[in-house]
Image: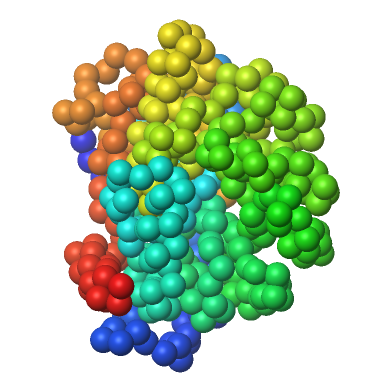
Amino acid sequence: MTPTTSSPTTPRPPRRRTVLAGIGAVPLAAGATPVTTAAPRPDPAAGPAPTTLLRGAELVLTMDPALGAGDLGTLERADVLMRDGRIAGVGRRLPAPAGARVVDVSGMLVLPGFVDLHNHLWQSSIRGGCHTQDLYGWLADCNRATLPRIGPQDMYRFVRLAALDALQAGVTTVVDWVHPIPFGTSEQYIRALDHTGLRFVYAMAHDTADLDLVPRVKKELLDPLPLASAQVAVHAGMDRLDPLRRSREVARDLGLMINSHVLEHRGDRAQEPIRSLRAADAFGPDLLMNHAIHLTEDEIAQTAEADVRVAHCPLSNMRLGSGIIRLPELGRRGVRTGLGHDGGTNDTSDMFGVMKAAVGLQRALHQSAEVHPTIPAVLRMATLGGAECLHMADQVGSLTPGKRADVLVLDPGTLNFAPRFDRLGQIVLNGQPGNVSHVYVDGRARKVRGKLVDVDTAEVVREAERAAARVRAGA
């Protein structure tokens, strides 16, 4: 079933030239062709977003208990109104404002966009690679071996490919943990993210000698973009205590969160990452820990007491044989936890798969169908829970009026999803990226009737293939 749209004939607003539009003076890798960016795209700064009414959804999950039944705020046969980039109303038989685009979503499911709490988008360059290795082997032979060979222009191509993959799969906010790269490469990285229309958090990791790049990237590249924000990415460990303290000072000066991989591999215990984060005064509500698989009971208690946030990446953890996070214990302690894809070790973007894995791993380990996370709990983790981890719950994560209009429309009328039985269970257990019919970010349509707006996906793939060939040739 495909939503239909009716709208008045209105001219498109002129597209702005972003702060990144003129970037192109970076030398190209040998044999590389310049990045082409002439294709039209929706622009979050080109005037107000259109007013859009999603009419007659079979089910709306608001993620706001005050706006529907139960903890997920479920409403049947309901409408969602988006105006000026925000949620303007949720309810039954909402009046259509003059000039509004009315989208018939009867039979469809509407919910907030997914929040991908941890990714490395450039790692689309190594999809499927080093598949016989654990984390340490994968880092050595795929991650560290590839990154230095990617020039700025090809970085744009890899990041755009992965960002569009995430967007078409229903991700509307992504946190990208970016390894140390030169300023010129950061320009192209951020440019690619901006061109997709995703809301994104750019978590910057830099060596101590280059920490001055963090405020520069924030001020020059991120602050002018309305959908962008920043974090400071770090490596935790007592052997890195001085750089960690310096990074914490920079983050505090800029008012940014710290973002760190913590205890992803059992061998990371030797580095004492929790001790180092506490010693650097970084262990608190402004810390996002990725993976956190091998926390002890005492460390879980410390995490809860300090209100540290956790990104759980089950598909990546499975791929690398890293272990199973103690999610039920984190849940009992009230630790704020969301879900992430984790770049090249997840290999593709599928938040439905991530949710299924988060549920299934715990059920298999504990041999219980009632263990945390339940189906409602994992849906919340993928949306509002992720927003809470980022201190962004006042902006995104639910369909509460006044929040930014980041919205998904799912089509359940497909071979993998039908027939209707239990819609909550089906979203998690049956859902696939192909069920994502419409995606709105800040009230602007980024995917319509199953197709990305103003994107030549075949060309995006061709450019990424050419870039990958250049990287392989430079090996």
Q: Position of residue 301 (x, y in %)?
A: 74, 25
* Quadrant assignment for the C terminus: bottom left
In the rendered structure, the answer to whether residue 203 lies left or right of residue 276 reads left
* Quadrant assignment for the N terminus: top left
Return the residue nearer the eye: 144 or 101.
Answer: 144
Q: Is residue 247 visible?
A: no
Return the residue nearer the eye: 75 or 35.
Answer: 35
In the rendered structure, the answer to whether residue 57 lies left or right of residue 391 reads left
- The quarter holding residue 465 reads bottom left
Instruction: Give me the residue at 63% from left, 78% from top.
Output: 220
90 lies above or below 124: above
Return the residue nearer the eye: 268 or 357.
Answer: 268
Q: Position of residue 239 (x, y in %)?
A: 71, 54
- The quarter holding residue 196 reads bottom left
Instruction: Give me the residue at 27% from left, 29% from top.
Output: 412
Instruction: Give me the residue at 82% from left, 47% from top.
Output: 279
Q: Is residue 301 visible?
A: yes
Instruction: Give me the residue at 55% from left, 36% from top.
Output: 266
User: How many numbered marks, from 0 up?
Assistant: 0
Return the residue nearer the eye: 431 or 71.
Answer: 431
Snapshot colouring: rainbow
In the rendered structure, the answer to whether residue 1 lies left or right of residue 358 reads left
Residue at the extreme left = 415
Q: Position of residue 389 (x, y in %)?
A: 64, 40
Q: Position of residue 349 (x, y in %)?
A: 35, 46
